[in-house]
Image (tube, rainbow, N blue to C red):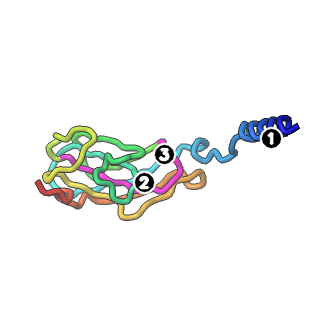
Amino acid sequence: MLRLASALILISALALSACGSDDDSDTTITKSLSGTVTYTGSLAGTLMVAASTLAMPQCPADTPEQYVTVLNATFPYTYTLTGLKGGDYYVSALFDVQADLPFPPCPRADDVCGRSTTFVTVSDTAPNGTLNFDLNVPGCGVSE
């Protein structure tokens, strides 16, 4: 009798887990972030723009959810990062002036960085977020 009761409980638990969750918020709508990166300097190089759930990533490539790399970027540069899951995102950028960084890049003293100071939330009800920011940290806070 105890075995039968245990078997029925196990079957019931398996049947309920097979039903799955009806929360498909990360799969039903393509979510994206877009915006404009501005830079008023005269330097040229490669731009990397990355979306991250970290407010202060050590490098733009630290755990990015999505990123785009642009050779010989011209400014203002309008970016779009697609395929994001629902959540809160910050956007950061690294302007590799010498175009000499390996992947993933971490800034050097001759590069210029910028990041959004606030986050934006993307979800099924608000799938397209916007964050504009400036490349305004010469040397990216790095000393060599």
* Mark identifier at residue 9: 1
Which marked residue is nearer to the observer: mark 1 or mark 2? 1
Residue sitting at the far left: 144
Q: Nearer the viewer, mark 3 or mark 2?
A: 2
User: Could you tell me the amino acid type at mark 3?
Assistant: Leu
Q: Are marks 3 and 2 in contact (CB under 8 Å)?
A: no
Q: Position of residue 140 (x, y in %)?
A: 21, 57
Callout 1 environment at 10 Å: few (<14), some (14 to 19), or many (20+)? few
Which residue is disc 2 drawn over?
53
- Residue 8 x %, y %: 83, 37
Q: CA distance from mark 1 to mark 2?
A: 40 Å
In magenta stretch: residue 62: no
Q: Position of residue 98 (x, y in %)?
A: 14, 44
Q: Is residue 112 left or right of residue 80?
A: left
Q: How many marks?
A: 3
| Mark 2 residue type | Thr
Residue found at the very far front of the displayed protein: 2
Towards the viewer: 54 or 82: 54
Instruction: Classify mark 2: residues with Cα within 10 Å, few (<14), some (14-19) or many (20+).
Output: some
Q: Earlier in the sequence, mark 3 or mark 1?
A: 1
Q: Residue at x 42, y 45 (%)?
A: 65
**Magenta range:** 83-96
